[in-house]
Amino acid sequence: MECRGVVASYDHFSDVLTLWTSTQSPYLVRRFLSQYIGREEGKIRVVATDVGGGFGPKCVHYPEELALALAALKIGRPLKWIEDRREHFVATTQSRDQVWEMEVAAELDGKVSALRARAYHDNGAYLPYGLLLPLGSVVNMPGPYQIKSVDVTIDVLFTNVVPSSPIRGAGRPYANFILERTMDCIARNLKLDRAEVRRINLIRKEQMPYSTGGKLPNGKPVMFDSGDYVACLDMALKASSYTNFERRRAEARKRGRFLGIGIASYNEDTGIAPYEGAHVQVFPSGKVVVTTGAGAQGQGLKTILAQIAADQLGTQPSDVSVEISDTAAFPMGMSTAGSRNTVTAGSSVHQAALGVRKKAIRFVAEMLEVDEGTLDIGAGAVIARDVAGKNIQISLAEIAQRLMGQVNVPGPSGFSPGLDAIAYHVVERPVYANGTNVAVVEVDPGTGRMDVVDYFVAHDCGTLINPMLAGGQIVGGVAHGISNTLFERMVYDLNSGQPQTTNYGEYMIITAPEMPRVHVEHMESPSPLNPLGVKGAGEGGTIPCLAAVVGAVEDALSHLGIKINTYPLSPARITELIASKVAQRAPPDNSVS
């Protein structure tokens, strides 16, 4: 919900231009400024302090960053620009519509043989992100399902509205919505259970790694690395008491309410290319400092990286200081996008901290003339045992002091100065998170009001570094998805294309009273593609949410024969659908006036 903001300042003494900006990509902004201003990157510093929500629109650079930088250089004074809410609606990139036509071939048991899809993507004006958003909709098709024959075409259309950008899910929620509504359509037409249709089509654990036959933008095959998709489905169904749902439906009907349940399974490419790096250093004070080019936007990145470093160095996370999102602190970085930082930056911190650990152990082994295998690290020290069996502890602070050296005193032979290491985790292919969501929605047939009364998530993001933060990411993603489905709608004037929703009085978003209790269960299927076995979790709550909620609304109205294949939904739309079906069922009026 945070609008964008930029502060630019030029320092004559250092000849450094500094830009503070609410961006997800400070290094890409620096590159952009260097190219357009003609100034060396070393003379440009870009800082992104904690961003109050990015979700995609803040990945790209904007004209205001260039304009303020040029003005600050010209007048030599600090300048500030803060975007207001209306400006945000009319000038910041946002997600746009997609329209899909889907054909599917299925056996009588629900097994899908083939699908053919044609999609149309409204890209708005220009291409600030290239074709990244429509690419996200098609590259992982057919999602978590083993469908051998897939033919998907997507046409990108230019229109006179705000340019499109990835938003939490980056095109994947569209594709997931289409796939999951297709699974429900198969179940309805073949009179099968919706969960069983998914079960028979899901990729099996023993098939991992699984190749879809598709290709990534770099030409490598799309390959799902690990996961137990069927087990995730079963976890969500059990948590939601899916098999006993008809009792709840009957109880709601007695209160004059229609209750429905919806299911959606998904997988998502996370930890995307190309790299992030990290530097880990122990100072003579004993303080551990981690620096990285990765940035935070509310996901608890500093906590995660501190935990990872502390695990290797035997310290407490509170003893680790993490510096991020500052181009002056670390030489290279990419972007906070695509649920990538725990995989990329986390793996880099792990590798760098491991390098520091090995260096400290080797130093103590040579100092004490013992085998490295007899040493360990704990409580911020290298631990050895003397001949009497007592522990000898050499603190990391003391090792750092000795390796730091003194003037005119040679350092330890065979060791580079300082107790530190730098590492870059380079990604060639993404790692795939997965899960199943189950939504329970209550519909008031008189007003069309839809309340999500229960929500269940079974989610697999590989090795869990911090379950509380991972759960928070999932719950936040669910809130985003429910808001997308039931509240958010951009309205444009049909004649001139001018936006009619330019504030939160006109553009609705979810608030606390509309938020259900979200029950989250975690599964851990470590990825073999990085040293931590982690996968991303930032978008997993949003991607399947749209289909799960719409599926639940349709199920609540299924006794009326109502079918729903679009979102966002509104109470007015629901009452229209109900009224239309009731009118069709009403006996003809044969009275004579």
Image (cartoon, grey):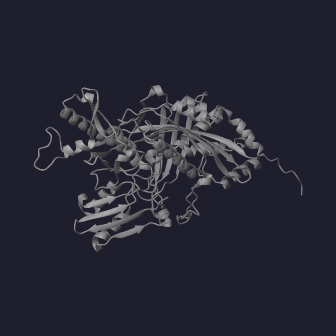
Residue 285 shows in this picture: yes
Look at the picture and state if 332 lies above or below 461: below
Viewer-proximal residue, 166 or 227? 227
Viewer-proximal residue, 366 or 439? 366
- Looking at the image, residue 323 sits to the left or right of residue 468; the answer is left
Residue 563 shows in this picture: no
Q: Quadrant of residue 8?
A: bottom left
Viewer-proximal residue, 3 or 574? 3
Q: Position of residue 336 (x, y in %)?
A: 39, 50
Q: Position of residue 459 (x, y in %)?
A: 51, 38
Look at the picture and state if 29 lies above or below 481: below
Point 29% across, 74% down: residue:
75
Q: Position of residue 87 (x, y in %)?
A: 47, 66
Q: Position of residue 299 (x, y in %)?
A: 44, 49
- Looking at the image, residue 583 sits to the left or right of residue 504; the answer is right
Point 61% across, 28% down: residue:
108
Point 24% across, 62% down: residue:
39
